[in-house]
Amino acid sequence: MAMRRWEPLSGLSRLHEEMDRLFEGTMRPFWPGRGEVELEGYRLPTIDLEETDEEIVLKAELPGVDKKDLNVEVLPESVSLKAETSEEKEVKEKAYHRRERSYRSFQRVIPLPQEVKSAKAKASFKDGLLEVHLPKAEAAKAAKAVKVDIG
């Protein structure tokens, strides 16, 4: 039996491949991608939530979506984003005629960490970036951490 040199890091490449396969198969819907998350053929916009003392700011990347195709609804506990876009391309050449149609839609409901004043929400949309400012409800603002003495 020949002696073989022990290399402690040789198994890492196999472990790396196994982890890639695990995340590709089961965790893909939750793994952030480049601007969008894909879930069985549907695309969901990536979002950021920022919280200050006075408001919650939601930012969503919506590449390829026009303002007229976007619907934003705010409830005290969540924000709903919906969009439907369609596109048609036609190319006519001597030897062929090609027409392509594409349709894309998504709906995403984002739960909020605290209740907001939905009637006072303000949104802006520019260059595919949606920004929604959500003022916190008075009860949410008043809820502050209180130090409790241990007896």
Image (cartoon, rainbow, N blue to C red):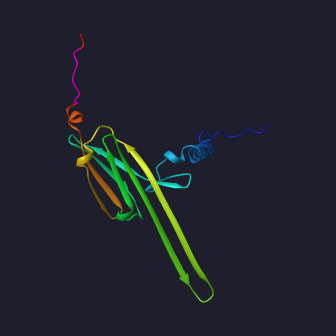
Pinpoint residue 110: horizontal percent, then vertical percent.
38, 45
Task: Provide the major secondary structure of the magenta segment.
Answer: loop
Quadrant housing residue 140: top left
Furthest residue toward front? 119
- Residue 35: within the magenta? no
> Residue 11 or 90: which is nearer the viewer?
90
- Which percent across, then down, holds residue 115? 29, 38
Q: Nearer the viewer, residue 119 or 57?
A: 119
Q: Residue furthest bottom?
A: 94
Whether 146 is among the magenta residues is yes
Give above or below for 29 relative to 91. above
Q: Quadrant of the N terminus?
A: top right
- Between 12 and 20, the residue placed more toward the observer is 20
Question: Which residue is pictured at 67% across the width and 40% down the height?
Answer: 5
Q: In the rendering, at what x and y percent does residue 12 appear? A: 59, 42
Residue sitting at the far right: 1
Instruction: Judge left or right: residue 135 versus residue 34.
Output: left
From the top left corner, tell me how far across and down residue 25 is, in percent: 60, 46
Tell me the residue at 33%/38% (across/down): 113
Q: Which portion, as a residue range, is magenta? A: 143-149
Q: Quadrant of the C terminus?
A: top left
Which residue is at the front of the view, 124 or 28? 124
